[in-house]
Image (cartoon, grey):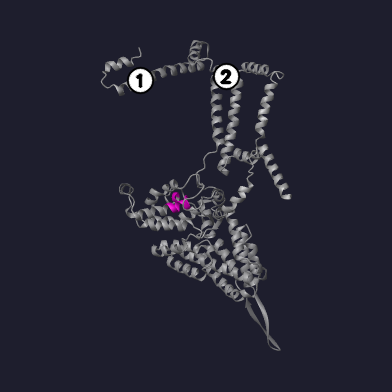
Amino acid sequence: MAEAGTGFLEQLKSCIVWSWTYLWTVWFFIVLFLVYILRVPLKINDNLSTVSMFLNTLTPKFYVALTGTSSLISGLILIFEWWYFRKYGTSFIEQVSVSHLRPLLGGVDNNSSNNSNSSNGDSDSNRQSVSECKVWRNPLNLFRGAEYNRYTWVTGREPLTYYDMNLSAQDHQTFFTCDSDHLRPADAIMQKAWRERNPQARISAAHEALEINEIRSRVEVPLIASSTIWEIKLLPKCATAYILLAEEEATTIAEAEKLFKQALKAGDGCYRRSQQLQHHGSQYEAQHRRDTNVLVYIKRRLAMCARRLGRTREAVKMMRDLMKEFPLLSMFNIHENLLEALLELQAYADVQAVLAKYDDISLPKSATICYTAALLKARAVSDKFSPEAASRRGLSTAEMNAVEAIHRAVEFNPHVPKYLLEMKSLILPPEHILKRGDSEAIAYAFFHLAHWKRVEGALNLLHCTWEGTFRMIPYPLEKGHLFYPYPVCTETADRELLPSFHEVSVYPKKELPFFILFTAGLCSFTAMLALLTHQFPELMGVFAKANPESVPMSVKIGSVRGKHHARSPSQLDFCQLLVFIQEQSQVWQLVSCYVQLQSISQPLGSSALKHVTDPS
């Protein structure tokens, strides 16, 4: 019984919601009916005639002011709409309409049951969309002190945004701190240092942490009853303090490498001690996890220092050893550093072996993996590829594989080709990237452009084939071709990650909203009316008061032609222009007849054609 009552209430509620959805149409017809019934008491006809008389008594100055004000207001709306669209990617009027007016007009989605049923089917795609909009740490990020700060000193522009640096601070707190830091004074200081916004405060805190470790604790050891000696005991070094100094204080890569080597000695000792105690409790386990992250970070940055200093083979060996020692730590994406170093050595067979391991459908893709696979396949055919020859004989199997690999890479990240083809200028890559976004494209092209240039014809093949990808992707992008649909969150996240002086690449190109086009047309139309009304006030007043359908155009022109002696010079020029347009229309009609006769009757002589086209 209760279920029946609940079902009846739900049915009644749905009926009420449905009635309110279409109630505004009923109100509209009711208002029209009342106006028709009360037309005599309300004196609607008299009021309309009064309004008509009022409009006939208006001066041309009123129309100039009216059209000018309308043009000004619509122009201001257009400017605001364009600014809002450039900043947020949507129309302000459209957003307000959808957010506030749609619920009032009954546009609320009431198919909750259908949505709940379809939510389970779309959970996988939604989860994939969320993962693709996640911000990742750039595995090839530069050094702040030795590279980013030097760029600031030279150009005076900040290459990193506050949002990007804040994400790095959160990463440092996650990787380099744990709950037991308060037990060690140096680590307690570094825990506060990672939260500091001021770079100088962070560097000072790192020096303070190292100075604490230099303090020697004296332990009294009795030898005999009458004498004692003092044993000197050194506290362990603080590895994270060396990391901060190497990242932010060192002005060259060589200085950073020296500090990282000191950090390696301290970090390796802490890692070995915590490894022995990790099974003694959750606190020791968390400390061991922190020490592992610190050690992996130090070794990876040492390998990157060797790569920057030209010792590429040494860097490759260090990366391979690190991946063997810690195979489960995929968060650092060390394989992308390894791919870049192997490409520098032109060890393409080793690159292919790494791709075979990491280019798996179950792993998250990246621009490095997709475009490196495309580069290897393009390398096999790019030196002999010719667009003219390919159009004549068709693509071979190897060329088809290369083109498909390029299409696959472009679908994953469509921003990369413009940087590889140098159609857009590069900037320093950020410390964090967004998969499939402009930030990832910058990070990839910054390090891999030289590898594409080294392969003969690879950029030519990319230039000839990359735009064909967009013909394969359905539009609108409700579903992808080889990957999931392109996420809609990339533009907003990239604008937060990239500096303001960089023009963010947007895909897909957003069409101008309807209200921008509407306000642009309204502004142009009212501005034209204001100009014509100001230039020809009396004539525009006649057009505004007269009924255009009641008077033919030829009569209007004739009346204007007959009265031009009483008008000003500007009005006289306008009247002559109207007469000239009417005469030119007759001439063009004669010319069109001449062209038709010439095309269908070639045997006619010149005298006959001259007789036909003679205006007299």
541 drawn magenta: no
- Asked if residue 500 lies left or right of residue 611, the reply is right
At 56% from the left and 48% from the top, the residue drawn is 492
Q: Which residue is mark 1?
A: 593
Residue 228: x and y in percent read: 68, 85
- Asked if residue 532 lies left or right of residue 15, the reply is left
**Is residue 202 something that shows in the picture?**
yes
Q: Furthest-front residue in view?
A: 1
To which quarter of the image does residue 267 belong? bottom right
Q: Main secondary structure of the magenta part?
A: helix
Helix, strand or loop status at disc 1: helix
- Asked if residue 17 lies left or right of residue 471, the reply is right
Residue in the foreground of this view, choosing between 212 and 140: 140
Residue 20, placed above or below residue 529: below
Residue 372: x and y in percent read: 43, 58
Mark 1 neighbour class, 10 Å CA radius: few under 14, some 14 to 19, many 20 or more: few
Residue 198, placed above or below residue 616: below
At 68% from the left and 43% from the top, the residue drawn is 11
**Is residue 259 something that shows in the picture?**
no
Of the two numbered discs 1 and 2 on the same chain, state the one appearing first in sequence: 2
Helix, strand or loop status at disc 2: helix
Residue 414: x and y in percent read: 47, 50
State which quarter of the image contains the C terminus. Answer: top left
Q: Which residue is mark 2?
A: 544
Residue segment shown in magenta: 407-418
